[in-house]
Image (spheres, grey):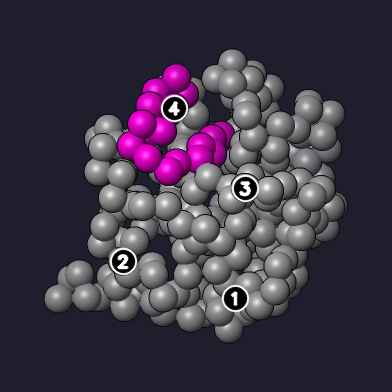
Amino acid sequence: MTPDIKICGLKTDAAMAAALAGGASHVGFIFFAKSPRYVEPVEAGRLREAARGKAKAVSVTVDADDAFLDEIVAKMQPDMLQLHGSETPGRVAGIKARYGLPVMKALSVSEGADLDRIKPFVGIADRFLLDSKPPKGSQLPGGNGVAFDWRVLAGLDAGVDYMLSGGLNAANIGDALRQANPPGIDISSGVESAPGVKDPALIEQFFRAVGAARDNRAA
């Protein structure tokens, strides 16, 4: 089974084209001002047009208020809302009710006990994004290029739909797929030539690596 693949932090037409050509199921746009991947809602709305009918467009916010979410939903028209902050189950439920859109809740993981944080969101969030914890001093909740020990995901309850994130790249995606067998994967910094600069060649290389890993498992 081929996992869903989300290329996150897109800012250019060339990167979007590479993501879609590779077969991305999801394309993500970052609305967090401190991130080098930040994009204005209007520009994200322009870029996401190329994905219509091909991939789901995901807005990524960090503890955004309703006014900012209203602007994003109006100008970008996302297919899914990714919440990458400290949003509570109640806040997630409220956002779902307000916009009528599926929500993916991001949670940071470093050890098996962190998986307990999923439970309060079960039945509320439509999907989870399991990311590594930010390095000390980082102002970014994600996109730090740091992986966690994927073996801890063996303790995940069956049926939890999630995307694996954190430090993925063409060199390690085969190991990640073998160890965790995630239903979805999310990559951002692993296909960049510099922070916030997506490299179409690295995106293509990543998709080739995913395909090679899939073929090896099928052999």
Tell me the mark number nearer the camera, choosing from 4 and 1: 4
Kind of residue at badge 1: Ala
Label 4 secondary element = helix
Kind of residue at badge 2: Asp
Mark 3, residues whose alpha carbon is within 10 Å: few (<14), some, or many (≥20)?
few
| Residue 2 magenta | no
Kind of residue at badge 3: Lys
Task: Residue at 45% x, 41% y: name it.
Answer: 109
27 or 153, nearer to the observer = 153
Question: What span is colored magenta in the figure?
Answer: 103-121
Kind of residue at badge 4: Arg
Mark 3 and mark 4: span between their CA atoms?
A: 21 Å
| Residue 184 seen | yes
Q: Earlier in the sequence, mark 2 or mark 1?
A: 1
Query: Hey, which quadrant is residue 11 in on the image?
Result: bottom right
Q: Which mark is residue 175?
A: 2
**Dots 2 and 4: beta carbons under 8 Å?**
no
Q: Can you identify the residue that label 1 sits on? A: 18
Q: Position of residue 208 (x, y in %)?
A: 41, 79
Q: Is residue 116 above or below residue 142?
A: above
Mark 2, residues whose alpha carbon is within 10 Å: few (<14), some, or many (≥20)?
few
Mark 2 and mark 4: span between their CA atoms?
A: 25 Å
| Residue 111 magenta | yes
Q: Position of residue 17 (x, y in %)?
A: 63, 74
**The C terminus, quarter of image:** bottom left
Task: Residue at 52% x, 58% y: name it.
Answer: 146
Q: Which mark is residue 117?
A: 4
Q: Can you identify the residue that label 3 sits on? A: 136
180 or 123, nearer to the observer = 180
